[in-house]
Image (cartoon, rainbow, N blue to C red):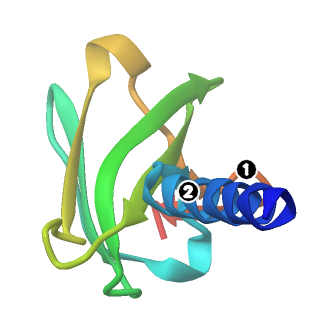
Amino acid sequence: MKKVIIFGIIILVIICGVLVNMFLPKIVSLEKIAISDILNEEKEMTVKGTFTDSAIGFSGYNASSSEGKVFLEISGKFSLGKMDGNFSITLNKEKYGEPKEMYLKDGKKSVKIWPK
């Protein structure tokens, strides 16, 4: 009986760990992101797009800049239809400078998205 209870607790902990991991935000891979528009205006840049995987909802982004290059990492998390996969990210040029190029990255690799 004691072994069954211990085994049940272990299985419950594993299942909870998997569920928590599924719903935590993660950087989305480049293959699952479709950029639809990039607007370069006087004081800001706006990147619009969506996820190609309908089970992912937009949860945020990280942006950094270096030597006129802006790097954008987009985060998403597992969605059960409650979150929208569309996103619109506005970057203030006062913070990131006047960009010469913009890259989308997923931690492992990056791809130039502006200018094309």
Q: In which quarter of the image is residue 8?
A: bottom right
Label 1 to label 2: alpha-carbon separation: 26 Å
Label 1: element kind: loop
The disc placed on residue 74 is: none
In front here: 15 or 53? 15
Residue 35 is situated, as x and y percent measured from the top left of the image, at: 35, 73
What's the residue type where badge 2 is placed?
Answer: Cys
Q: Does residue 56 appear to the left or right of 63 in the view shown? A: left
Q: Does residue 56 appear to the left or right of 100 in the view shown? A: left
For label 2, count other residues whose C-alpha is less than 10 Å away and answer few (under 14), some (14-19) or many (20+).
Answer: few
What's the residue type where badge 1 is placed?
Answer: Gly
Between disc 1 and disc 2, whose residue precedes?
2
The disc placed on residue 16 is: 2
Residue 28 is situated, as x and y percent measured from the top left of the image, at: 54, 63
Name above or below for residue 114 compared with residue 30: above
Residue 41 is situated, as x and y percent measured from the top left of the image, at: 15, 40
Quadrant where the N terminus lies?
bottom right
Name above or below for residue 26 compared with residue 99: below
> Viewer-nearest of labels 1 and 2?
2
Name above or below for residue 23 compared with residue 55: above
In front here: 14 or 31? 14
For label 1, count other residues whose C-alpha is less than 10 Å away and answer few (under 14), some (14-19) or many (20+).
Answer: few
- Give the residue drawn at x 41%, y 58%: 76
Q: Does residue 67 appear to the left or right of 40 in the view shown? A: right
- Give the residue drawn at x 41%, y 20%: 96
- Give the residue drawn at x 47%, y 49%: 24
For disc 1, the marked residue is: 107
- Give the residue drawn at x 77%, y 67%: 4
Residue 18 is situated, as x and y percent measured from the top left of the image, at: 61, 63
Q: In which quarter of the image is residue 31?
A: bottom right
> Which residue lies most toward the right here?
3
Label 2: element kind: helix
